[in-house]
Image: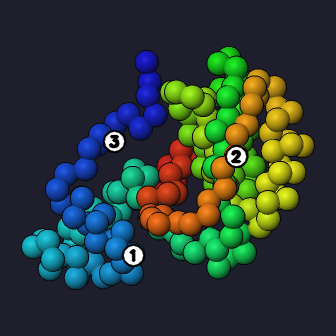
Amino acid sequence: MSREGEGRRERLDELDLGIVDRLARDARISNRVIAADLGVTEGTVRARIKRLQRERLIQFAVVTDFRMAGSPNLIMMGIKVDPTHISHLARQLSAIPEITCVVVLLGRYSLLAMGLFTSIEQMNDLVVEHIRSLPGVQSVEASISVDSLKYEAGIAKITRGPARE
């Protein structure tokens, strides 16, 4: 049986973790500074970063403060789904631009979908007119974030797309 990601390293070693930690704190840090911090050559750091990118273990992206970027409402939706529809529904939700995260769960809900919305009305329209009508959806419970104490955007962008060179 083939698994996605087979053939690549399953775990990051200490050097990889050190590089990732420094990049997560400051993606603009130079390879030279990372190398000096970790006691390796700049070439080693450059090669490791290229491998991590090739294996899609790291990506570089601009991260914005969602409240300042015009989508001040972070919404979490717990969705109960008929078990035979979970995978298909997760893919459908993932295609919706406003939804930024879809996770399959064990427990009270089958899926958790998070999204950024410009207004509560926009979220309501999406839930009422689109999500609830999808085959297999049993219920949707939305929760609206009123304060964000910790939001680590550096770990938020997880994708399963094919590796790009």
Image point 46% across, 34% down: which residue?
Answer: 4
Dot 1 corresponds to which residue?
27
What's the distance in space between the residues labelled 1 and 3, CA to CA?
A: 23 Å
Q: Amino acid at mark 2?
A: Ala
Image point 60% across, 40% down: which residue?
Answer: 112
Q: Amino acid at mark 1?
A: Ala
Q: Is residue 83 above or below residue 40?
A: above
What's the distance in space between the residues labelled 2 and 1, CA to CA?
A: 34 Å
Image point 70% across, 40% down: which residue?
Answer: 141
Alpha-carbon neighbours of circle 2 within 10 Å: few (<14), some, or many (≥20)? some
Which colour scheme appears in the figure?
Answer: rainbow
- Image position, residue 49 (x, y; %): 32, 64
Dot 3 corresponds to which residue?
8
Q: Is residue 103 above or below residue 124?
A: above
- Image position, residue 151 (x, y; %): 48, 64
Q: Disc 2, disc 1: CB below 8 Å?
A: no
Residue 57 as seen in the image, left or right of residue 101? left
- Image position, residue 117 (x, y; %): 74, 62
The answer to whether one can see residue 91 in this image is no
Determine the image quadrant of residue 8. Answer: top left
Q: Which numbered disc, 2 or 1, marks the residue that appears first in the sequence? A: 1
